[in-house]
Every structure is written in structure tokens, then in C-alpha cells.
Image (cartoon, helix red, strand yellow):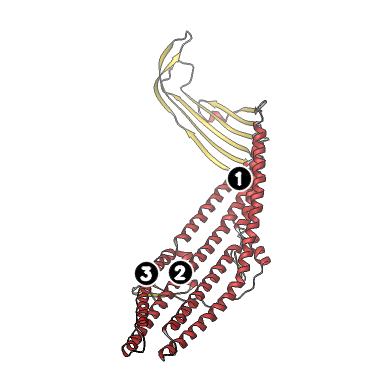
Amino acid sequence: MVAFLNTVAQTNFSIEDVIARAQSQSPASKQAETRKENRYWQYRFFRTNYNPQLRLNGNIPYDNIVSQAPLADGTFVNTKINQLNSFISLGLQQPIPWTNGQLSLNSSAGYFNNYNHDPSSLQPKEQWRGTVMNIQLDQPVFAFNPLRWDKLTEPLRFEESKRDYVEQMEFISRESVGRFFDVLESQINLQIAQFNLANNDTIYKIEQGRYNIGTTSQDKLLQVELQLLNSRKDVAQARLDTETRGLLLRSYIGLTAGEQLKLILPETIPQFEVSVEEAVQYARKNRAAYIAFERRRLEAAREVAQAKGQRWQTNLSASYGLNNNGLIVSDIYQNPQQQQQFNLTLSVPIIDWGRNRSRVQTALANKKLNDYIIAQDEVIFEQEIMTQVGNFEMLRLQIEITKKSDEVAQQRYNVAQNRYLIGKIDITNLNIALTEKDTAKRSYIAALKSFWTSYYDLRRLTLYDFANKSLLYVPNTED
């Protein structure tokens, strides 16, 4: 291979080296890793919705103001207020995921101090109040339960994100293959261009000698000179393309500027058999898209349940506790009084001109449309895999044919070059052999590129390595 940057360090890179570097150091891999981490913490946040929460709430308002106080005759008197009215509460809250209710256990204490207290007043300067214990239930009735639906969809979304991360890594592999062969093709083109330039320079000198002794025409000499000029142009263009594509590859895989790319042609092809049924089976088992189908169905059913749950609003609230007050803190806990509360709120539309029915029917229509879209997506999902598998064997055969063509074209050119040197064929036939040689070489490289791109596409579409017979993603039940 022809190196393209005049730097000190030089490293040989196989296709596996480029892929490994891209998966560990490329900006695309860092983005995929960050998205994976973000989705992990979203899932952790979702799980906390079902755990008890212990909360401490407090309020310490101090007022030193002048305020208007109304009198019995309707007039007002300005009164100076200087008081502290603080409050603190400790509560344990437990969501009820089956009913979307909430059960809480609370204890609280409050302190009041009137700094402008009149000693002749019957009211004390300091007071304590508090609730020793209070149990409360808040329960919506016949309402939409988001906790129940989240418990169905969020684990699927999290599992989908983990599989999507592996797919992103395989997509990076596939993109790395494309960029690898872009550079390799440009290096091959540069090698061909330099080889042709050297040959055309030699041919031009031969034709000059023949022209000088009168064995060739000026027309043929000018034709060879034009070929030489075109060869110089081709070398310059090939060198520019190599540098440009090399920089793109460096940027993608995170390669430092001090390392020179020298790519190794991946001619060893993995040998394995793959059937359409096997590929579809692994895709259904492993792909994030297949989990997404189920999640999308559940989300559509969730929208229907939410629309039905908005037809009326009913909420039940009940609590039982013990509270008291006193001049000192200990008075709160001396013979506390029972505290009982019950409340039922109801909001039912009597005439809504079909508003609720329209909302429910819209959600049902959206669910039906979503089912049709998912069914079509499943067909496309399987067709993509079938197409990929169908092309795979053809690509393997194409490599064998183009490799043999490359060898034959090279031998033919060598024969044509020797016959030209002894004057058996003219420059036109030599140029035809040269063009066929270059075309065969480029076709072989293109066939290798198509195979390796298809190979990593197949891995991405199934999350299965058919060459090593191993899963690329193994579910972690501990998550």
C-alpha cells in the first residue's frame, strides 16, 4: 500500500483495528455511550416512583410588620405584629401502583411566639401544636393509572435502549468499514496512478526513440505524450483524494495527527452459512426494533385508557390521627385528641356535547392506525433482513470472480507490455490492456467493500455474529 502523509510515526491498520478504535475513541461512540448512560438514569428515576419517600418539610416565618385589623363597626385599626409561627413535618409516603393511590404517615409540630404579647391578655405568649401521628389515604376512583402503564412500558424502553446501544456500536463498525475502504480505494488509485505514470514515462521515451528512427508516427508520439500528461494529473488527483479521505477517517476513529495510516487489505473472508429463517429469528430475538413494536402497542393502548379515565373525576381522601396543643412541647404528647377527616370529591359532566366520546374515539382511531403502521414496519423489518441475506452469498461469489479477473487482467497486461516492447502490438492495444487491469483491480476492491459492509450490516440487523456463532447482546437480568 502507498502511504499518504509524510509523518514520523507509521502504523499498519487492519479493518479490525479501525473498527476497534472507532468503537472506543470515536465521537460517535462517545455519543452512544452518553445516550446509554442517560437512558439508564431515566430508568432509575422511573423505579423510584414505586418506592417510599421520606420527606422533611419545614417553615419558619417571622413577621415584624404593621397590619390593618378590622373592627366590629367596619373600621380598621393599625396593629403592630411581631411574631414567629414555625412548622416542621416528617412524612413517609408510599405510592400504591395497583390503584394510583398514595398512603402516607406523618408527624408534625408547630411553635408560635407573640413577641408583642400583652401580659394582661388571656392568650399565652408561646404555644405548641402538633400531630403525634396521622395516616392518610388519597385515592382516585375510576381514574387513569399512569403507574400501572409505566410499569409495562418503561422496562421495555430501557431494554430497548440497551439493545439500541449495541446496534449503534455495530453501525459504527459498518461506518468504519465504509471509511476504511474509501481510504483504501484512494490508496489503490494512487498506487495505480503512480504505476501508470512510470509506465507511460517509459513508453514515451520508447516512442521518442522510435519516432527519431522513423518506426512510428508523430500521431502516436503525441498520443503517448498526452497519456503521460494525463497520468501526472491522475497522480495529483489521487494524492489529494487520499489525503482528504484519510483525514475523514482519522477524524472518525479519533486518530492522532502523528500516526500515518497504512491500511491492510482484508482479503480473508469469514466462512459461514446463514439462512433467511435463522437471520429473522435472531433479529426478532435480539433487535431493539422488535421490542419497540410491543412498546408502541402498549403506548397506544395507554392513550386509550387515559382518554377513558378523563370521562369523570372522583377522588377519595381519608385520614386518621392524633393531635394536641399546649404551652410546652411535651404537652403535645399528653393525651392527644383523635383527628379524623373524610372527603369525597366528584366531577361528572352532565352535558358535554360528545366531548368525552370524541376524545375516546380519537384515541381508538389512533390505536388502530398505530397497529397498521406497526404491522407495516414489521414487514419492512423482515424484508430488510431477507434482502441482506439474499445478497450475501452473491457478494461472496462476486469476490471470487473479481479476484480471479484481477489476476487474469494483470497477467494479460504483462503479456501485452512485453509484446509492445518487441513491437508486436501498438500503443492502442496496450492501453486497452492497461485499462482492463485497472478496472479489474478497482472492481475487486469494490467487491471486498460491498462484502464487508454487508457483513456488518447483517450483524447490526440481527445482533448476532454468524462467523463466531455468538450473540452480540446478552440480556442482563440484574438490570
Q: Relative to 362, is 201 on the left or the right? A: left
Q: Is residue 77 visible?
A: yes
Q: Quadrant of residue 257?
A: bottom left
Which label's residue is closer to the chain start, 2 or 1? 1
Give x and y (percent) for residue 416. 46, 86
Task: Say which quadrant the C terminus sits in.
Answer: bottom right
User: In which image quadrant can residue 243 be found?
Assistant: bottom left
- Residue 205 spot, x, y in % from top left: 33, 85
Q: Closer to the N terminus: mark 1 or mark 3?
A: 1
The residue closer to the viewer here, 202 or 187, is: 202
Circle 2 is placed at which residue position? 182
Q: Marks 2 and 3, how far apart in space?
A: 13 Å
Tell me if residue 468 can be seen.
no
Amino acid carrying mark 2 in the image: Asp
Per the image, the residue denoted by label 1 is: 50
Sequence-wise first label, 2 or 3 = 2
Disc 3 marks a residue whose amino acid type is Leu
Circle 1 residues within 10 Å: few <14, some 14–19, many ≥20: some
Task: Choose between 186 and 436: the one closer to the eye.
Answer: 436
Residue with the most extreme bottom position: 422
Whether label 2 touches label 1, CB < 8 Å = no
